[in-house]
Amino acid sequence: MSKQNLTLRWGILATGGIAQSFAKDLTVDPKTRNVTNLTHVVEAAASSSSKSRAEQFLKDVDAPSSARAYGSYEELVKDPNVDIIYVATPHSHHYQNTMLCLNAGKHVLCEKAFTTNAAQAKLLVNKAQERGLFLMEAVWTRYFPISAYVRELITSGKLGALTRVSAANDKAGDPYNKHADGKHRMVNMDLAGGALLDLGIYSLTWLFQTLYLTQPEGKRARPSVVGSSMKKFPTGADTDTTILMKFPNGGGDEGDAQGIATTSMIVDSDVDGKGTSGPAVRIQGEKGEVQVWPPIYRPTKTRLILADGTCEDKQWPQPGPGKGSGWYNGFGGDMQPEGEGQGMFWEADECGFALMEGRKEGRLEGWEESVLIMEVMDEVREQNGMKYPKEVESVEYPLKMK
Ligand SMILES: NC(=O)C1=CN([C@@H]2O[C@H](COP(=O)(O)OP(=O)(O)OC[C@H]3O[C@@H](n4cnc5c(N)ncnc54)[C@H](OP(=O)(O)O)[C@@H]3O)[C@@H](O)[C@H]2O)C=CC1
Ligand SMILES: O=C1OC[C@@H](O)[C@H](O)[C@H]1O
C-alpha cells in the first residue's frame, strides 16, 4: 500500500558546489510547486576532508540544528535516521560511493554522469535490485515542468512525426588559461573529467527524452551512434564532442529520426548570458518545432513554431524563493536568478514519490535508460580513443581511490 505523506530524511555525501545547491533547494517550500504530501529535511552531511567541513556545510545550507556532521562517508551511511543519500562527488567516485551507500541499505540519488562507464552502472543497478533499494541518476532537467511540456507536445502529436533533434550544451570555461594545470575536475582524467560526461550528458538527455522516452514503454527501440568526433585537452579530457545518432521509430510511424548532440567547454551556447544566441535545442517534426533556450540543463524559455502560423513563447521560472546561490557550475559562475530556487527539488520530489509508491526507479529515467546512455558515452569514448585511468573505470569494490 502506498504512503500518503512523507518526510524524506537526506544524507548529503560530499560538500562541494552542487551539494550546496541541492541541499539549499531542499529548504524551498514544496507548496510553491503544489506538493503537499512531501517534505525534505537535511538530516546529515559527510565530508571526506574533515568533520569541521561537514559542520560548516550544514550551517551554510541552513540545516536543522539536529543535523549530524561526519568526517567520513563510511560514518554517514551508518546513520539509522538517514533514508536516502545524495552522492555529489566527481564522476570518478560515483561507483565506489554509491556502492557504499547501497551496501549499507540506503536509497541513493547519484549525480550525473551516473558512473564512468556502463559496466559500473549495471553493477549499481544489480545491487539496488538485489537489495530492494531506490536508485536514480540525478538528471534533474528531466523532472522540470518545461521538459514535461516538450514531451507532451511530442506525444500529443502536435509537432507531427519527429525528424530531427539537435541539442547543444556548451559552457565556455577558458580551460587553457584558467585550468592549464589540469587539476580542475572538468579536465582532470583522475576525476573522470571532460565535456562529454559533465555537459554532453544534457545534450544526450534532450535527445533521449524526446526521441526515446516518448516511445511507448516496452517498445522503445535502441538508438545507434552513427559517428562522433572529439577535441581534447592536453590531459586527454575532451573539450568538444559531437555525436550523430539514429533513433529507430523516434519519428513514430514515420520511422527513424536523427539526433545531433554537441557539447563544448570552449564555446558557449549563450554567449552574452542573455539568450541572444538563440535556442540550443531544436525538436523538429513534420508539423513544426519546439525550441529550448540555453542553458539546457536549467532552461527557462521555449518557443513553439508550427506550420499553421502558431508562434508561442513561454517562460518557465523555477519556483522559490531559493536560499541564494551556492550554485556552482563546472567553471564557476552563478546561474540562479534572484528569488528563484535552483530547480533541484523536482528530482528530490521524484525520490520521495517513488518511495511513497514503492518504486525503485525514477519515472522519467529508469535504470535501463541510464545504462543505455552510459553505453552511448562508452561508444563515443571508444570511437575517439578516450580512456580514463584503470582504477577510475574499474568495477572492483571496494577500491581505494585517489
Ligand atoms: N546537477 C547539476 O546541475 C550539477 C551537477 N554536478 C555534478 O556533481 C558532481 C560534483 O560536482 P561539483 O559539486 O561541481 O564538484 P566539486 O569539486 O565542487 O565538489 C566535489 C566534492 O566531492 C568530494 N570529493 C571526494 N573525493 C574527491 C576527490 N578525489 N577530488 C575532488 N573532490 C572529491 C569533495 O567533498 P568532501 O571533501 O566534502 O568529501 C568535493 O567537495 C559531479 O558529478 C558533477 O557532474 C556538478 C555541477 C552541477
Ligand atoms: O551538471 C552540470 O550542469 C551545469 C554545468 O555548468 C556543470 O558543469 C555540470 O556539472
Image (cartoon, grey):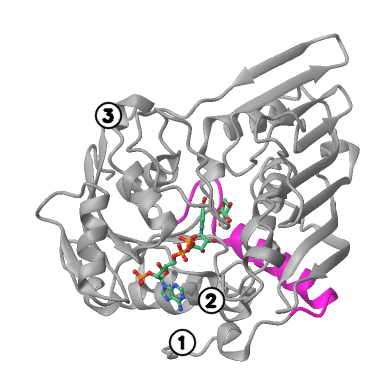
**Is residue 356 found left or right of 223 in the rendered image?**
left
Which label sits on residue 401?
1
Of the two numbered discs 3 and 1 on the same chain, state the one appearing first in sequence. 3
114, 361: nearer the viewer: 114
Residue ID at (48%, 72%): 94
Tell me the residue at 74%/65% (across/down): 376
The answer to whether residue 51 is seen in the rendering is yes
Which amino acid type corresponds to the residue marked 2 in the rendered image?
Answer: Ser
Percent across and percent down for residue 385 are 81, 80
Front-most of residues 51 and 163 = 51
Q: Residue 6 appears in which quarter of the rendering? A: top left
Q: CA distance from mark 2 to mark 1?
A: 9 Å
Q: CA distance from mark 3 to mark 1?
A: 41 Å
204 on left or right of 348: right
Q: SS of the residue at dot 3?
A: loop
Q: Which residue lies under the disc numbered 3?
A: 36
Percent from the top left, x then y, of residue 197?
A: 64, 64
Residue interval drawn in magenta: 361-386
Q: Does the Cβ of the disc 1 residue fall within 8 Å of ligand 1?
A: yes
Verify CB contact (< 8 Å) between mark 2 and mark 1: yes
Residue 390 sits above or below residue 189 on the image: below
The reply to whether the C-beta atoms of the residues labelled 3 and 1 are less than 8 Å apart is no
Name the disc covering residue 92, or none. Answer: 2
**Kind of residue at badge 3:** Thr
Query: For disc 2, does the CB lie below 8 Å from ligand 1?
Result: yes
Could you tell me residue 31's position as x and y percent?
A: 30, 26
